[in-house]
Image: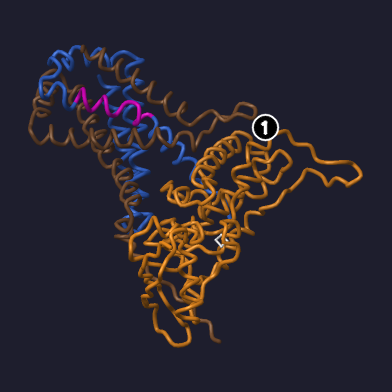
Chain colours: A blue, B brown, C orange
Amino acid sequence: MARSNKPIVWSLFAAGGTVAAFITPVMILVTGLAVAVGLLPAEALAYDRMLALVQNPLGKGLVFLAVFLPAWHAAHRLRITAHDFGIRADVAVMAVCYGLAALASVIAAFALFRV
Amino acid sequence: MSRRPYRRAVSTTSWWLARPRYIRYMAREVSCVFIGAYTAVVVVGLVRLSDGAAAWGAFLESLQAPVSVAFHLLALAFALYHTVTWFNVTPKAMPVQFGEAQLPGGVIIGAHYTGWALVSALVLFLAGV
Amino acid sequence: MNERHVDLEILRYDPETDEEPAFQTYRVPCQEDWVVLDAVNYVKDVLDRTLSYRWSCHMAVCGSCGMMINGEPMLSCKAFVRDMPDRIRIEPLANFPIERDLVVVTDDFMDKLASVKPYLIPREEKAIEDGAHVQTPAQLKKFKQYTLCINCTLCYAACPQYAHDQNFTGPAALALAHRYNLDSQDVGRGAREDVVASNAGIWECSFVGACSDVCPHEVDPAGAIQQTKIASTVDYFMGLLTPERDR
Ligand code: FES
């Protein structure tokens, strides 16, 4: 039997799962709920503040990691979940899942590069 | 005496309904759909931000739509479930042994929750709470 | 005496006459301190001598009496009737072919077990005159838990990944590979990796964790597999950095 190449995708999955566990809940709370329902002042997500965040090199890097790693985590887990729901076309599933994660990462990088 | 071993069929699509622990497992796995979808929202937000102040304003406005709030509530529930299920198995994946003594799993889990609380508090602080 | 009547629904299968397995119900008067195995023994001794099943030690040591009890893989000698409802459904261990009644074919597990080389592979043979191998309590502690496996295969019956892909090496065999890999006297990790770190090895596992839940001796195969994934991932990237190393 040949040794697997899974460590490549699994290490991204594990790193992404850890990052998502630490930051995704609070990010959802701030960007998706608190401001929208008025728990936080609109100022929290004001254009100038957000722009300052993503123009700062450190902020840029952190925001990219906060997109890239959870995206790969989700993609890899989705691939396995598809199998668990009885979908056996693993090559097609893999292409779609990893393809979407790659697309999201590239678009995020492009947007962060542009601002 | 003739052998004729019988193999019972297992459903490939609904096997997980058989036991509560399998349902909990699938709920954990499905959390990835919401983490992925939320990440997509963030990517859209980044693109809108790079489009300028007007585009960003429109993006913020769209987040106030009831369907957006409902999505984020659901996503928050699954994201929290991911966090809990992820932290709670850390002692299994990364046990810590000092000499003959095993660091209790609760300490490893507790350290993760403490770090999580600090990170969350920091983000909330930066957001202006 | 405290007698309680319990209905045992036992899955029966006779390969010579039955097309497929079917349930047969037996009413058994149970004592307060009985385990499910006692009730099954009562069926065999008193009600129906044709019933086939395996058991030996009656003390959770030999690992031969595993059955699905109300859908959960358990050692029938460790499952107390007093903790069960009045109808108990007893089936052969899931995910294995049924040989007859509650007896399953475990050949596949035996092959998987052998494939991970579950024995010490020492750096060099040592003559008896040269004295004992030395191991500190701390070194023993690293793998002690994984030595407790009794090969009862409850973990295979609980594992949905094994249910859907019989190529999967499976929980107990991978836990035992981990046990030898962690042993300070062993240098066989590289020799085990070809099986352990293949797609059908640790990477088939999605950490459902059911194996560890049902393990009667708290071996925690799921934990062993995750630790092996981390170690194999480190190996993999180290191998990329030093390609000349024999992988
Ligand atoms: S009879 Fe030996 S483990 Fe149950």
Helix, strand or loop for the magenta stretch, by majority = helix
- Residue A39 quadrant: top left
Residue B63 falls left or right of residue C216 = left
Membership of B21 in magenta stretch? no
The stretch of residues the image draws in magenta is A19-31
Q: Give residue A22's position: percent from left, percent from top.
A: 35, 27
The outermost residue toward the right is C129
Q: Secondary structure at mark 1?
A: helix
Q: Give residue C83's position: percent from left, percent from top.
A: 39, 55
Q: Name the residue type under label 1.
A: Ala
Residue in the foreground of this view, choosing between A52 and C85? C85
Q: Residue at x 50, y 42 (%)?
A: C223
Residue in the foreground of this view, choosing between C147 and C233? C147
Q: Residues within 10 Å of mark 1 (few under 14, many from 20)?
A: some
Q: Residue at x 54, y 28 (%)?
A: B103
Where's the C terminus of chain A, which quadrant? Answer: top left
What is the chain identity of the residue bearing mark 1?
A: C
Q: Which residue is mark 1?
A: C138
Residue C78 falls left or right of residue A42 = right
